[in-house]
Image (spheres, rainbow, N blue to C red):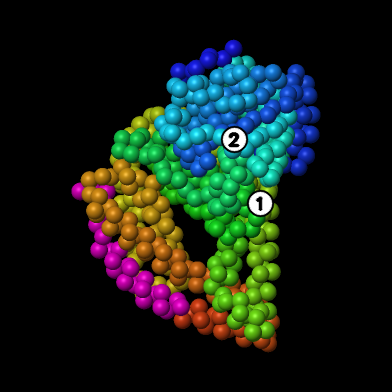
Amino acid sequence: MLARVPTSAVPELELKFQLGQGAHEALVAFFSIYPSSVSDLHAIYFDTPGHALRDGGFSLRVRRRGERYVQTLKHRAAGGLFERDEWEVEVPGAALDPAALASTPVNEVVGAEVLQAAFSVEVERRQLLWAHGSDEIEISIDLGWIVADDHKEPIAEIEFELLSGSPAALFALAEKLQQTADLTLSFQSKAQRGYRLAGHDGVAALAARQLAIGPGTTTAEAFKVIAREGLVQVAGNARLLQRSHNPEVLHQIRVGLRRLRAAMTVFKPLLDPAGLVRARGETRWLGRELSPARDLDALLARITTTDEIDDNPGRAAFLTAMRLAQAEAYEKALTALGSPRYRAMLLMLGQWIEIGAWTLDVSSGVADMPVESVAAPVLHKLHHRLGRGLRKFRSLTPEARHDLRKKAKTLRYATAFVSSVFGRHPGRRERYVTALRELQDQLGALNDISVARTLAKRVVGRRGGEMAFAAGLEIGRLSTEEARILRTATKTVRNYRKRRAFWVD
């Protein structure tokens, strides 16, 4: 019997995977030698009409299992990928029991608002216990549906919860199973999916969230928080992209990848070289696979209005050719996101962030140092490299400006990660961050035009006639726009170079 009113949260460590085609059958066959039980679960999730619990990072449900009803409140713990706080209590029936929430944070979040049913989850769960030495892992394989009003979405997932032993056992078992079945690491709970189905988040791309880093945060803690968030951003948006071709969703996958790589640069003194090389290599691979689709998205966004295209056969043919190229590029991106390499990459990164070799090396003392003491020299180095590249900005080739843009982007992400720990000069910090953001935006615009011009030529190829003429006009327009942006960028460069670093006195 569970406690009537729990006084504290019980942390749980778990991994969750979405099942691909044929995965359920493969998993059932793999675990056929283990005793298992099958049960039907029905859960109702509760929230206020405005979803105040969801906005506060909570989920609240009452689940029926057999003849028992259990009320559960969950909250993501300390930014962890695989840890959650959980309050659980047995209740008399399917209705919400307010008294059981008295010692939880719910009332602080909800206030006087009324809690009501938001959506339901119905699954058939196969459950078993996997044991090896001192390691015990509870395994749940779920098939079913999420229902919100008239909307339904299928559920097919497997979840591993560590009951005892080493977290490494979770990853080892998952890696072994990934070689047997199509399993994609997921950070979306059923509650998050239910809220999206209920219209809380719609089909919006998942942007990076505010990072919980402050003065005194250790370097190891800071890296985990930053890298976790980047990985969640990549995985969440990748799942969305597989459902609809949304340019902003694709963009946010690439943002997540860049944030991960920027974190690797900032925290390089902390990280193990072998793991760093592998992580950089895999994130670069995925970035290259997604890049053509993003470049064509940017080019198509610059094409003039539909009315003007309809009145110009050459322009219409040029647009058609670009859309065909875009469709091929998205197919390439989706192939990468559906590949075994991508699935292995997610698991590898998750394992490296949580329990990689760098977490075991305490000899240098870097892990326990305040993040500001490690970040300051890295920021200074990135700042110096960018400043040196800006000295002859007007005479740089598009390729050199692209390299400069990457430096600016890395520095911008780095400052975003850790600027909150440098509070001595808030005004200077704000001016620096603003100038750097404007600089990156201008360099990004210049790079988009350079790439668009190259893509326009490539799309036309050796074709002639009206289409080639229309492409030539577009290339000319892009060149004119580039000259205008270059003048603005030159002023932005001068403004940035006046800014003093905020991480030094």
Q: Nearer the viewer, residue 388 or 240?
A: 240
Does the image show residue 468? no
In the picture shown, does residue 184 fall above or below 245?
above
Tell me the residue at 68%/45% (across/down): 151
Give the amino acid type for the residue marked by disc 2 in the picture. Ala
Q: Is residue 438 magenta?
A: no
Q: Classify mark 2: residues with Cα within 10 Å, few (<14), some (14-19) or many (20+).
A: some
Q: What stretch is highlighted in magenta?
A: 481-505
Location of residue 317 in the rendering, given as x and y in whole percent from the top left corner:
68, 79
Give the amino acid type for the residue marked by disc 1 in the picture. Gln
The single residue placed furthest to the top in the displayed view is: 1
Quickly name the residue at label 1.
242
Predominant SS along the magenta part = helix
Location of residue 238 in the rendering, given as x and y in whole percent from the top left corner:
60, 49
Tell me the residue at 42%/66% (across/down): 443
Q: Quadrant of residue 469?
A: bottom right
Does the image show residue 182? yes
Quickly name the residue at label 2.
117
Nearer to us: label 2 or label 1 = 2
Tell me the residue at 49%/45% (across/down): 230
Q: Is residue 491 magenta?
A: yes
Q: Which quarter of the rendered picture does the N terminus lie within?
A: top right
Q: Classify mark 1: residues with Cα within 10 Å, few (<14), some (14-19) or many (20+).
A: some
Location of residue 42 in the rendering, given as x and y in whole percent from the top left corner:
68, 29
Going from N to C along the chain, the mark reached first, 2 or 1, is 2
Tell me the residue at 50%/43% (across/down): 50
Helix, strand or loop at label 1? It is loop
Q: In this view, does 42 lie to the left or right of 395?
A: right
In the picture shown, does residue 9 fall above or below 113?
above
Location of residue 456 in the rendering, given as x and y in whole percent from the top left corner:
59, 75
